[in-house]
Image: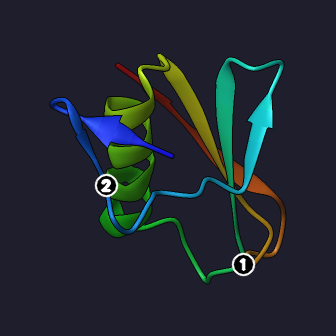
Amino acid sequence: MVTYKEKVLKSPYIADFLVFDDIILEIKSASIIIDAHIAQAISYLSVSGKKLALVINFGERSLTWKRVVL
């Protein structure tokens, strides 16, 4: 159950992984990490109150990642 501005969201956000109960980990398999992937991580951070998310992409020739901090 996710609450935002004192309301329970009907369609809760579900992050791929929560590491050490503190870091949101989003896994992708895309040709590149795009702004929409970062926006998704920011949304997860906003509603969860967490401060750090990692977007990890396995779809490129080698592993790429972006750190998202609020």
Residue lying farthest left?
A: 5
Q: Nearer the viewer, residue 4 or 32?
A: 4
Quickly name the residue at label 1.
Answer: 29
Q: Could you say where residue 15 lies in the image, as x and y percent from the top left?
A: 62, 53
Q: Is residue 54 above or below residue 38?
A: above
Q: In the picture provided, is 64 more to the left or to the right than 7?
A: right
Q: How is the image coloured?
A: rainbow
Q: Is residue 14 above or below residue 70?
A: below
Quickly name the residue at label 2.
Answer: 9
In this view, the mark in front (2 or 1): 2
Q: Is residue 64 above or below residue 31?
A: above
Give the residue type at disc 2.
Answer: Leu
Q: Could you say where residue 52 lies in the image, as x and y percent from the top left?
A: 54, 22
Q: Earlier in the sequence, mark 2 or mark 1?
A: 2
Q: Could you say where residue 44 lies in the image, as x and y percent from the top left?
A: 43, 43
Q: Could you say where residue 6 lies in the image, as x and y percent from the top left?
A: 19, 30
Q: In percent of the image, x 47 and y 16: which residue is there?
A: 51
- Secondary element under disc 1, as helix, strand or loop, is loop
Q: Nearer the viewer, residue 38 or 19?
A: 19
Q: In the picture provided, is 40 more to the left or to the right than 16?
A: left
Q: In percent of the image, x 80 and y 69: which residue is there?
A: 58
Q: Which mark is residue 55?
A: none
Q: In the picture provided, is 32 more to the left or to the right than 2?
A: right
Q: Are marks 2 and 1 in contact (CB under 8 Å)?
A: no
Q: Nearer the viewer, residue 32 or 70?
A: 70
Give the residue type at disc 1.
Answer: Ser
> In the rendered view of the protein, which quadrant contains the C terminus?
top left
